[in-house]
Image (cartoon, rainbow, N blue to C red):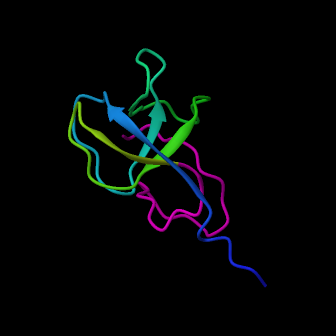
């Protein structure tokens, strides 16, 4: 069986959240600034989500995973493997 772990879509985006994000944090595409992301406290947001692939300071550019295998995802509670990702009311 072929492994799909190497197939990812990762793009550089600017952090417009007002704070730093850590590797594995769930972020959303910023709809107010080009080529940027932010964070949200809206549960089950309908914005496009991504996963930070490294620590990214405020207003710095960093790698965001938009599709594919994510080796690390930070979550606010326990989850079961195979669940879909969604945002939570906690950043």
> Is residue 82 toward the left or the right of residue 55 in the image?
right
Query: Magenta span has 80?
Result: yes
Outermost residue, right direction?
Answer: 1
Quadrant in which the N terminus appears: bottom right
Q: In screen coordinates, is 4 left or right of 21?
A: right
Residue at the spot 52% in from the left edge and 62% down from the top edge: 70
Region in magenta: 66-91
Residue 1, placed above or below residue 59: below
Q: Nearer the viewer, residue 65 or 80?
A: 65
User: Which is the main secondary structure of the residues drawn in magenta?
Assistant: loop
Q: Residue at x 58, y 34 (%)?
A: 48
Residue 69 located within the stretch drawn in magenta: yes
Query: Which residue is at 60% across, 68% downward?
Result: 80
Residue at (58% x, 63% y) in the render: 69
Q: Quadrant of residue 72?
A: bottom left
Between residue 62 and residue 25, name the one nearer to us: 62
Residue 63 place in picture, x, y as percent: 39, 48
Residue 77, compared with residue 27, is above or below; it is below
Measuring from the top left, give residue 21's x and y in whole percent: 28, 45
Q: The C terminus appears in which quarter of the rendering?
A: top left
Query: For the view shown, which residue lies furthest in the bottom direction?
Result: 1
- Name the spot of residue 71 as percent of width and height, x first: 48, 68
* Residue 20, above or below 40: below
Picture quadrant where residue 57 is located: top left
Q: How many marks?
A: 0
Question: Would you place residue 30 above or below residue 70 in this image?
Answer: above
Q: Residue 19: horizontal and vertical position, in percent? A: 21, 35
């Amino acid at each position: 069986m072929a492994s799909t772990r190497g197939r990812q879509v990762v793009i550089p985006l600017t952090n417009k959240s007002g704070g730093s994000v850590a590797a594995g944090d769930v972020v959303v595409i910023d709809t107010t600034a080009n080529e940027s992301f932010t964070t949200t406290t809206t549960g089950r947001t309908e914005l496009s989500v991504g996963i930070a692939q490294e620590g990214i300071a405020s207003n710095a550019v960093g790698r965001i995973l938009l599709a594919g295998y994510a080796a690390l995802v930070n979550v606010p509670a326990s989850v079961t493997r195979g669940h879909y990702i969604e945002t939570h009311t906690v950043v």
